[in-house]
Image (cartoon, grey):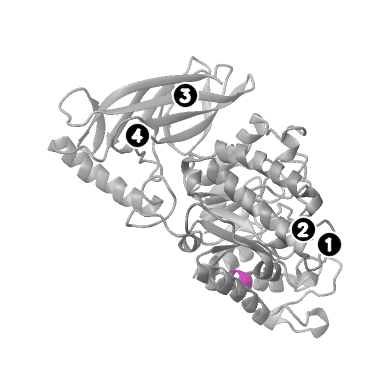
Amino acid sequence: MFSHKLKTSLRALKAGGILVAASLLSYQVQAVQCEYKVSNDWGSGFTGAVTITNDGTTAITSWEVEWSYSAGTTIVNYWNVNLTGSNPYNANNLEWNATIQPGQSTEFGFQGNGDNAMGTITSCVVAGGDNGGGDNGGDNGGDNGGDNGGDNGGDNGGGDNGGDNGSGSEPSAVELTDLMGVGWNAGNSLDATGGETNWGNPLLNQQLFNSVKAAGFDTVRLPVAWSKFSNASNFTITDAWMNRVEEVVNYALNADLYVIMNIHWDGGWMQPTYDQQEYVNNRLAIMWKQIATHFRDYDHRLLFAGTNEVMVDGDYSTPTYEYYTVQNSFNQTFVTTVRATGGKNADRYLVVQGFNTNIDHTVNFAQIPTDTVADRMLMEVHYYDPYNFTLNQNSNITQWGALATDPNATETWANESYVDSQFQKMKSHFVDHGVGVILGEYGVISRPAVSGHERYRVYWNEYISRSAIEHDMVPVYWDNGYANAYGFSIFDRNTGAQIYPEIVNAIVGALE
């Protein structure tokens, strides 16, 4: 990995609302290190990043970096930064990553075209919030420290962590769910076991996530399959895949979305049996150590989710003691492994699941993992009831709920009152005891050949979304990118355009 470092002591003044680098007349000297690095270079293009590290003793409250390339190299995409100029390029902080505490770092990334990836940092300018007196201390400690320590600290939990808390302290896991609003799954993309486009979807892109945010969603779930891109003998994940997942995470963060990133089905290797317990826990620990270490400096808008729908293949019955205790051990391995990687992972919000994400199995059998920090745990379940209406494409059950007019096309169970009673179980068992709840998947397949079906599909999604919000859960709609019959897609994966605006409005409208 190529890197170029610029380390300098800078004094910051605020004059007429403009930050300038000064060499004299400051009460506070701050040391900042800016490091340029190339993470992937394929000859005609590259991805890279700049890390800004605060080596001083007081908080940095804004920053600006300038760098340049030899002729012919251009930046074509970027994330976690405001970017202007064209060789040299000028980057300055967003609101949420403006503040860098002493000893901490922040990073922004970019993609470039050209055969020369080796950029040269020419300027690295910062301003501080605790300058301790005099005109510069007054301006930056009051204005910039006040703006970023108050506004940015309010919006991002003290400057470097997620959460809207005006006091600067971070929200509890339950409080966080209120900030996460409603969510959307980028399903059947990064979780496609043969590669991102192997299940028919295009590469995920920035415009898609911008569109999801603009539609009113505040959270995105990124299901990820890692094993295709890891060494089968030692489970080492390739740099190329880790970087691609990071690029997509940055798309979402750049759109100001909370992100839930997991190890998804991934080929089904997490079998919860005594025979497989040691193997799975070892593999889970190895993989999560790599993932967590790579992302440990990301702010707390990024949540890790350990597993997905763990069950014994083909067995949908009530789990045995063996099955659910082994599955609980997977949750504990995940939490223990992530916490041990340090950095922001020491108190990152973590998401664990109940057995097969079934609400009844979760309430009856899930054990909350032992943790080293309080109020950072969330429980995830999924909801697809009644199956014959939501998932079974061969079923004659095509209506649902109070709007139904044909008893022969309607299930006799899993109506509105059932939804509310199931979600109340999650609230009573977890939310009321300080554990946040994520409804990580829900949805109904489209059946355009069935007259009137769309009306009931919209109503089901509206009711589930609203009931989830009313029971203090985060509803995250399952979108698999497939827009034809029996698909779940509500956004065009290429352009971000809304395919089913009625469903989008039904979900987002649950917040009203």
Labels 2 and 1 touching (C-beta < 8 A): yes
Query: Is disc 1 placed on a helix, strand or loop?
Result: loop
Disc sitting over residue 43 in the figure: none
- Residue 85, horizontal then vertical, whole percent: 41, 28
Rendered view: 199 above or below 458: above
Labels 2 and 4 touching (C-beta < 8 A): no
Residue 281 is inside the magenta segment: no
| Label 3 – label 1 distance at C-alpha | 51 Å
Residue drawn at x 56%, y 56% is 370
| Residue annotated with mark 4 | 63
Which badge, 2 or 3, is on the more N-terminal residue? 3
| Label 2 – label 1 distance at C-alpha | 7 Å
| Label 3 – label 4 distance at C-alpha | 15 Å
Residue drawn at x 52%, y 59% is 216
| Residue annotated with mark 3 | 36
Region rendered in magenta: 462-466
Residue 131 placement, left or right of 355: left
- Residue 110, horizontal then vertical, whole percent: 52, 31
Disc sitting over residue 315 in the figure: 1
Identity, as a three-letter code, of the amino acid under mark 1: Asp
Residue drawn at x 82%, y 66% is 392
Identity, as a three-letter code, of the amino acid under mark 3: Tyr
Residue 463 is inside the magenta segment: yes
In front: label 2 or label 3: 2
Q: Depth check: give the residue in front, 429 or 449.
A: 429
On the image, which quarter does residue 117 sit in? top right
Rendered view: 91 above or below 430: above
